[in-house]
């Protein structure tokens, strides 16, 4: 279960960096390790392929030192997703880490209880 949470953070992290400049697997491994993520080659490559398949990244090839390197660039859909998630991240950090929101969940509205809505 923890791995699922971490992969969500990593996806956002990848989109963030791809919005700054084209990214590639090895550089992402180094960057994620710098932030304390324990990742190896088996993590970023499937994730990059998945983000590409979902339309959030596109792949471009470049030749570096005679070798082909696959770079990933954020798409408009990726930028939109990142823009949509940023306020949610800020709210989550505010509530979970900063403690600025009430820890207690709000009571359900009377209409919800009458209609049997389970939220």
Image: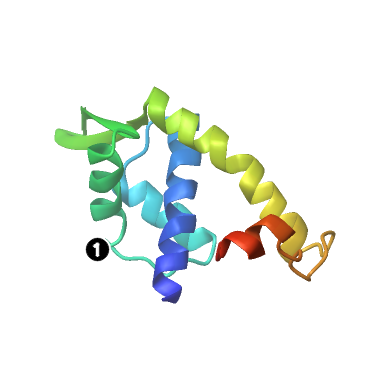
Residue 31, position as x, y percentages in the image? 46, 53
Q: Is residue 89 left or right of residue 46?
A: right
Give the answer, above or below, for where 11 lies relative to 64.
below
- Rendered image quadrant of residue 52: top left
Percent coordinates x, y for residue 14 in the rendering: 43, 45
Q: Is residue 104 left or right of residue 7?
A: right
Q: Secondary structure at mark 1?
A: loop
The residue lying at 40 percent from left, 71 percent from top is: 3
Which residue occupies 29% across, 33% down? Answer: 55
Which quarter of the image is occupied by the N terminus?
A: bottom left
* 6 versus 28 height, above or below: below
Q: Nearer the viewer, residue 69 or 59?
A: 59
Residue 109 visible from this viewpoint: no
Q: Is residue 96 left or right of residue 72?
A: right
Residue 74 higher or lower than 41, as above or below: above
The image quadrant of residue 103 is: bottom right
Q: Which residue is mark 1?
A: 42
Residue 86 % position (x, y): 61, 41
Q: Looking at this view, is 27 or 75 the one in front?
A: 75
Q: Residue furthest bottom?
A: 1
**Does residue 17 appear in this view?**
yes
Q: Residue at x 35, y 34 (%)?
A: 56
Frontmost residue, 98 versus 26: 98
**Which residue is at 49% across, 57% downward?**
9
Q: Quadrant of the C terminus?
A: bottom right
Q: Residue furthest front?
A: 114
């Amino acid at each position: 279960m923890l791995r699922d949470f971490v992969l969500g953070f990593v996806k956002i992290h990848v989109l963030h960096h791809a919005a700054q400049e084209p990214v590639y697997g090895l550089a992402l491994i180094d960057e994620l390790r710098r932030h304390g993520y324990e990742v190896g080659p088996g993590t970023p490559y499937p994730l990059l392929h998945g983000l590409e398949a979902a339309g959030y990244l596109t792949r471009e090839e470049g030749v570096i030192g005679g070798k082909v390197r696959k770079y990933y660039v954020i798409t408009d859909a990726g930028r939109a997703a990142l823009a949509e998630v940023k306020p949610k991240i800020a709210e989550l950090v505010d509530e979970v880490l900063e403690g600025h929101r009430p820890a207690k969940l709000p009571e359900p509205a009377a209409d919800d209880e009458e209609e049997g809505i389970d939220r």
